[in-house]
Amino acid sequence: MPESADGPQQDEYAQEQPECNIGTLGHVDNGKSTLVQALTGVWTSRHSEELRRGITIRIGYADATFYKCAKCRPPECYSNNKKCPTHDSETKRLRTVSFVDCPGHHSLMVTMLSGAALMDGAMFVLASNVECPQAQDREHLLAAEIAELKNIVVVQNKIDIVDRSRALENLKEIKQFVKGTIAGKAPIIPVSAQHKLNIDVLIEALEKQIPTPKRNVAATPKMFVLRSFDVNKPGTEPKDLVGGIIGGSIVEGVFRIGDEIEIKPGMRVEAGGKVRYEPVTTSIQSLYTGGGTVKEAKCGGLIGIGTMLDPSLTKADGLVGNIVGKVGTLPESQDKLTLDVQLFEKAVGTESMVAVDKIRTNEALVLNVATAVTSGTVTSARESVIDVAIRKPVSTEPGSKVAISRRIGESWRLIGVGKIK
């Protein structure tokens, strides 16, 4: 998903489309963005506030193509290089993947949950120089459970700044932390992202542990919007302006240049003191992957769609949380949800592991539905079913999963999971 209009011309189509999405999970400062940079060469934290504070705030993204040398033994044969650095010979392309780099800070948990909705697997990044688990390590592991991320590789990062005894002690902490969880059988790969140490071993583990899932390319196309932006630079002449870009992951089907598409719930409209959302229709002018432009984009990794939309609609992630599909194929937008709810025993992410009380009528909640984040008020709370009136509508279907967060102290904390009735 490009953030500039630069890149291949329209007739120079990329051949290597991303096939799956691999996320990064783990506490803030565990080195997630540095690890993605070691794998892709791209620093995903591009926003000015991210650069100033040194943390990921928005969802980051970058693509990498993995290769295998026929002359090298494993794991040295795995790399992200077209040429083997040892034999100076061409390597075999394995696949291209998109990395979804999620923020680890507790105040950005709802952003992380949006990214988890698009993951086919994840690298759970833990730091060897601190005790495991940290607060958001627990929260992210539970998020992986909610998203049903069964394909996980645990990464023991920062082994370059600890001695052998601490590395082994940390390994015991990690094994105890993931025991009996969705990551209980995941391989644990020690690395130094900073020095790109053991990256070949990590690529081998990603290839074996996170396979490309089967996709239904024949289905009606649908994409969840994770980012949106305006790529026009200040001072661009009117004749050179391009439409807004929406980025995300196609979950089924294929989009092609020229397709007429609909975006729901759409754009925010204020009239007569009231706010409503109206679906938006446009046409696909261009399709982008990390490798350049393509004629068609299949379900799999992250892509960017160039549209005819006014860039003011897409700037600063204005359309995040929407769904994109062919006109007339998307589910209706809803401003009221009925959820079957399963609450956790403890509010994960809090240092003291606060007990979770039952949801109450008139309580304020934050809900994550795929990549959409919306707040709402509980209008009715029964034993395990709640009705919620939400401020920003969502376009979703019965059976969809919803992550539920409650205000605890200064932050919104994950307290349970629901299913739309």
Image (cartoon, grey):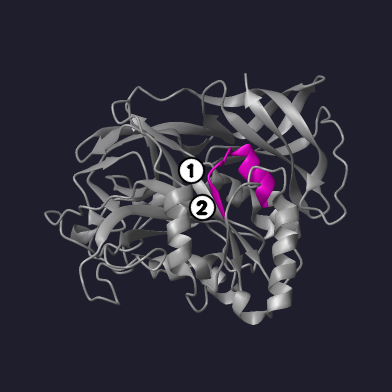
Looking at the image, do the residues carrying marks 2 and 1 touch, with CB atoms under 8 Å apart? Answer: yes
Q: Residue at x 45, y 70 (%)?
A: 38
SS type, badge 2: strand
The extreme left residue here reads 11
The residue to which callout 2 is attached is 23
Query: Quick check: 161 above or below 250?
Result: below
Locate residue 188, reporting x and y percent: 59, 58
Locate residue 191, reporting x and y percent: 55, 70
Locate residue 205, reporting x and y percent: 48, 56
Residue 206 appears left or right of 327: right
Query: Quick check: 52 above or below 174?
Result: below
Residue 169 appears left or right of 140: right
Q: Residue at x 22, y 45 (%)?
A: 285
Label 2 environment density (alpha carbons within 10 Å; few <14, some 14–19, many ≥20): many
Q: Nearer the viewer, mark 2 or mark 1?
A: 2
In the picture, the disc for residue 118 is: 1
> Magenta region: which residues?
140-153
Amino acid marked by disc 2: Gly
Amino acid marked by disc 1: Leu
Q: Residue at x 55, y 49 (%)?
A: 152
Residue 264 visible to the viewer: yes
Residue 56 appears left or right of 353: left
Label 1 environment density (alpha carbons within 10 Å; few <14, some 14–19, many ≥20): many
**Image-quadrant location for residue 156:** bottom right
Q: Nearer the viewer, residue 361 or 35?
A: 35
Residue 359 appears left or right of 186: right
Locate residue 282, reporting x and y percent: 29, 37
- Check residue 211 for magenta coloring: no
